[in-house]
């Protein structure tokens, strides 16, 4: 079967700022951070750390009481983002459309970790002998994808991808492949995670990779590529993209936002947490080859850029290797500086940002990047405010995960005509 | 009947936003959109409230009235030891 082109016809997200996707992107262009000091009354030691929360998110109001009560927070966030993208693509969330050729590909690193933690607290802290009856269906990693398919009536494959920080990028890429190869007409893709529970935060803290911060400087806690970067900022969130066979999108007169033109996946196969430039290089090159692009055509990279000392330098090294003489002119930014690290949702929210950046010809900056680490030099870091009017039409979105898994998406808007 | 109905009305208002007046003995679980998972939660609620330890093979009721009868029977059996 001939290779099919894949259109992106809808994007959606849950904004930690509280507004819609346009507002979220506009704030990123201004370099605004949604990182705040996150405090809890957990025992024995309350949490107080920079983090990103979707504090205004009201699952009951958006999903209804019945569905909200049947889902853990990561699935609630995922459903809300999926519904947002679904409407953006011109569909109605009220219709159960019963489509066997439409599917779901969803990423989550942690799944329903809040449900599990409630169960553990009941058993070991509260002295109970049993846990809530829906604990299994709340906690399972495929809860978000399953509920999205059930709510909207999507009968093709419904798969969940757990690839740590590359979960959503892998889900989007694998969903893209199903359409490209003729196995599905439309895939609702994306990712969601809600990692801000006591045990998960303490686990990340023990790994010594979390950025410190207090009430005065929490917003600036995540500083990718900066000489004084001090670690990542955990965040909860969700984002979704509707991917669609190009012909199908044209036929139903859907708004074509961009083309998902290529996907590259690789594994460093060396170390569980230490990244390798060689593995990242292969993922980027595979994405370019899949899209039929040369390095010189790429006009923006939304970097993985988590603000860990080692990871940022390795990523820039990989970009230098792939882009060679073009690297110095290649605009690169790490938007995690503003929206934190949403774990398995990161690849989706950054893919959405990349689509909007190309659409609006405005590249968001890496915030708080006052002094570039020499180890991260060699590309055109977008700093301060947005870089506007570059004419960028082709971009990459990088996602690199613990475990050595790498996923790169190639997105373009230079062929958004209605021809196939 | 009153205890069981009161528990169901409170639970279903909070869980599914069903108006308490709709929770009557003649109402069917289907019309109230009480599926097997919600029923599981309801039985869990009864266990908590009445100190029951229900068996796995509880019959599946079709109406609120049948559900009340099942729970009353289980309460009697538990009380009788």
Image (cartoon, rainbow, N blue to C red):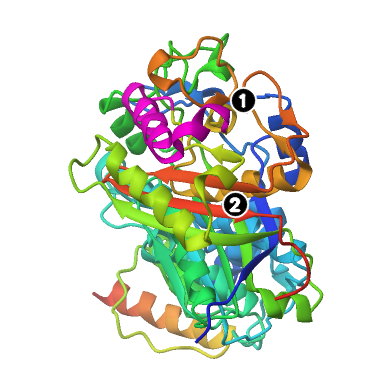
**Separation of marks 1 and 2 at Cα, in angstroms:** 23 Å
| Residue A108 % position (x, y) | 43, 54
- Of A126 and A334, nearer the camera is A334
Assess disc 2: are there few (<14), some (14-19) or many (≥20) residues with their C-alpha within 10 Å of its C-alpha: many
Identify the secondary structure beneath mark 2: strand
Q: Which mark is residue A382?
A: 1
Above/below status of A291 relative to A1: above
Q: Quadrant of the C terminus of chain A?
A: bottom right
Q: Looking at the rendering, which quadrant does residue A61 occupy?
A: bottom right
- Of A143 and B16, nearer the camera is A143
Q: Looking at the rendering, which quadrant does residue A417 occupy?
A: bottom right
Mark 1 or 2: the one toward you = 1
Above/below status of B39 relative to A305: below
Q: Residue at x 49, y 40 (%)?
A: A342
Residue A318: within the magenta? yes
Identify the secondary structure beneath mark 1: loop
Q: Residue at x 77, y 72 (%)?
A: A92
> What residue did someone put label 2 on?
A239
| Residue B63 % position (x, y) | 58, 88
Above/below status of A304 relative to A160: above
| Residue A380 % position (x, y) | 56, 25
**For marks 1 and 2 on the same chain, the one whose residue lies earlier in the sequence:** 2
First to last magenta residue range: A307-330
**Looking at the image, which residue sits at the far right?**
A253
Q: Which mark is residue A176?
A: none
């Amino acid at each position: 079967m001939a290779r099919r082109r894949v259109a992106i016809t809808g994007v959606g997200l849950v904004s930690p700022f509280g507004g819609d996707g346009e507002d979220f992107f506009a704030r990123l262009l201004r370099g605004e951070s949604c990182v705040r000091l996150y405090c809890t009354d957990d025992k024995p030691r309350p949490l107080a750390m920079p983090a990103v929360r979707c504090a205004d998110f009201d699952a009951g109001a958006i999903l209804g009481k019945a569905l909200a009560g049947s889902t853990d927070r990561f699935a609630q966030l995922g459903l809300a983002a999926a519904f947002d993208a679904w409407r953006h693509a011109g569909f109605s969330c009220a219709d159960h459309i019963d489509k066997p050729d439409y599917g779901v590909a969803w990423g989550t690193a942690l799944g329903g970790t809040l449900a599990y933690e409630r169960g553990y607290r009941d058993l070991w802290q509260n002295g109970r002998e049993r846990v809530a009856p829906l604990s299994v269906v709340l906690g399972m990693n495929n809860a978000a994808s399953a509920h999205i398919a059930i709510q909207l009536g999507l009968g093709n494959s419904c798969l969940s991808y757990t690839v740590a920080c590359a979960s959503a990028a892998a889900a989007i890429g694998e969903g893209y492949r199903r359409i490209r190869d003729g196995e599905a007409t439309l895939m609702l893709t994306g990712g969601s995670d809600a990692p801000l529970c006591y045990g998960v935060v303490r686990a990340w803290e023990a790994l010594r990779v979390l950025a410190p911060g207090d009430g005065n400087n929490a917003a600036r806690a995540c500083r990718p590529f900066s000489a004084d970067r001090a670690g990542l900022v955990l965040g909860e969130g969700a984002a979704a993209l509707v991917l669609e066979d190009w012909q199908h999108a044209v036929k139903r007169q859907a708004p074509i936002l961009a083309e998902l033109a290529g996907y590259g996946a690789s594994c460093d196969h060396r170390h569980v947490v230490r990244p390798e430039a060689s593995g990242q290089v292969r993922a980027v090159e595979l994405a370019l080859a899949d899209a039929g692009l040369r390095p010189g055509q790429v006009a923006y990279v939304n970097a993985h850029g988590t603000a860990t000392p080692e990871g940022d330098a390795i990523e820039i090294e990989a970009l230098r290797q792939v882009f060679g003489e073009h690297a110095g002119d290649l605009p690169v930014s790490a938007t995690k500086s503003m929206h934190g690290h949403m774990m398995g949702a990161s690849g989706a929210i950054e893919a959405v940002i990349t689509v909007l950046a190309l659409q609006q010809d405005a590249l968001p900056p890496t915030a708080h990047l006052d002094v570039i680490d020499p180890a991260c030099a060699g590309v055109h870091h977008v700093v301060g405010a947005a870089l506007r009017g570059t004419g960028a039409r082709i971009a990459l979105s990088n996602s690199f995960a613990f475990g050595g898994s790498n996923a790169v998406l190639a997105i373009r808007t230079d062929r958004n005509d209605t021809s196939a | 009947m009153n205890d069981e109905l009161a528990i169901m009305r409170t639970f279903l208002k909070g869980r599914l936003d069903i108006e308490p007046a709709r929770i009557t003995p003649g109402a069917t679980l289907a019309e109230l959109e009480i599926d097997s998972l919600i029923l599981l939660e309801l039985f869990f609620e009864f266990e908590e409230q009445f100190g029951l330890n229900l068996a796995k093979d509880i019959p599946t009721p079709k109406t609120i009235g049948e559900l009340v009868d099942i729970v009353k029977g289980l309460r009697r059996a538990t009380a009788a030891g």
